[in-house]
């Protein structure tokens, strides 16, 4: 009896699924714009964004230039966002702002175009092209809508992605240092300070620049060593003056003492 009831249950479920598919296909093949739009909105409200998107695509050409077009395109763009198709979502959000330039939803769509790029921002270890693009678009949004209530969120998102870019740049310098490529390490660290002046790691980074300079000087050929020893000493002096209580100061002083002793070799 239990097996029989289970079989009946499966039959009922399958029948319901077939019925749902048949209902959707019936509308999709109806060539009825009003039916497309009405049913698409029902699917959209129910969270079935794939079916809604399919029917919106069919309806768009019939409603172009009509009063319904704005809301149709608004929801159509969001179907891509809700399905995490962020590249297409960004495209359609942005296209909305160009097509319906007098719309009260234009500000929202401009923000969502930028936010879709933010959604594509990967972990710091990966290529940060989407992060850079998102920052640019969010900054454009802030400049275009300086009084928008979304400005505060936009600034927070920019800060978040800049920290990610900063971390990637810092890790690049660390990698060069581990590989013994001290010249490239110094350049990478200097770029972090230049590109991210708000960094909370400035003390650590300046210490790592000195360490890289020190290691480079030690491994230099004779005719380049003197200048690099002096560079390390100069950076060490500046560091001591700027961070007199630094946890790195003892190490910095050791590097400087080594370089001062080595310079005696160059005294005529």
Image (spheres, helix red, strand yellow):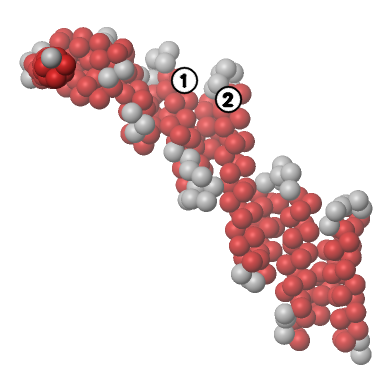
Q: Secondary structure at mark 1?
A: helix
Q: Quadrant of the C terminus?
A: bottom right
Res 200 → quadrant: top right
Q: Residue furthest front?
A: 1
Residue at figure coordinates x 86%, y 81% from the top left:
262
Res 212 → quadrant: bottom right
Specify whether residue 194 is in view. yes
Observer-nearest of 17 and 76:
17
Q: Secondary structure at mark 2?
A: helix
Against 24, residue 171 (above or below) is below
Mark 1 highlights which residue? Answer: 107
Relative horizontal placement of residue 8, taking residue 244 as reference (left or right):
left
Specify whether residue 91 is in view. no
Against 237, residue 266 (above or below) is below
Mark 2 highlights which residue? Answer: 153
Res 153 → quadrant: top right
Precedes in sequence: disc 2 or disc 1: 1
User: Horizontal and vertical percent for residue 19?
Assistant: 11, 15
Residue at figure coordinates x 34%, y 33% from the top left:
85
Against 116, residue 246 (above or below) is below
* Mark 2 to mark 1 CA distance (whole Å): 14 Å
């Amino acid at each position: 009896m239990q097996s029989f009831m289970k079989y009946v249950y499966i039959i009922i479920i399958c029948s319901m699924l077939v019925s749902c598919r048949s209902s959707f296909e019936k509308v999709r093949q109806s060539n009825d714009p009003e039916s497309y739009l009405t049913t698409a909105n029902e699917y959209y409200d129910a969270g079935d964004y794939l079916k809604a998107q399919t029917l919106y695509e069919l309806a768009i050409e019939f409603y172009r230039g009509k009063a319904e077009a704005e809301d149709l395109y608004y929801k159509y763009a969001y179907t891509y966002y809700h399905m995490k198709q962020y590249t297409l979502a960004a495209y359609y959000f942005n296209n909305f702002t160009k097509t319906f330039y007098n719309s009260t939803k234009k500000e929202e769509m401009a923000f969502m175009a930028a936010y879709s790029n933010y959604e594509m921002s990967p972990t710091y270890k990966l290529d940060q092209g989407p992060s850079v693009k998102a920052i640019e678009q969010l900054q454009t949004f802030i400049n275009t809508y300086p009084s928008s209530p979304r400005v505060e969120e936009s600034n927070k998102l920019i800060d978040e992605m800049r920290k990610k870019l900063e971390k990637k740049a810092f890790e690049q310098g660390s990698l060069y240092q581990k590989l013994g490529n001290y010249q490239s390490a110094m350049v990478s660290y200097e770029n972090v300070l230049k590109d991210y002046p708000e960094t909370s790691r400035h003390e650590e980074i300046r210490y790592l620049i000195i360490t890289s300079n020190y290691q480079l000087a030690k491994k230099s050929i004779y005719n380049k060593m003197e200048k690099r020893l002096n560079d390390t000493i100069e950076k060490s002096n500046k560091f001591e003056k700027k961070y007199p209580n630094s946890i790195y100061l003892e190490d910095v002083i050791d590097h400087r003492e080594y370089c001062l002793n080595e310079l005696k070799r160059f005294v005529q």
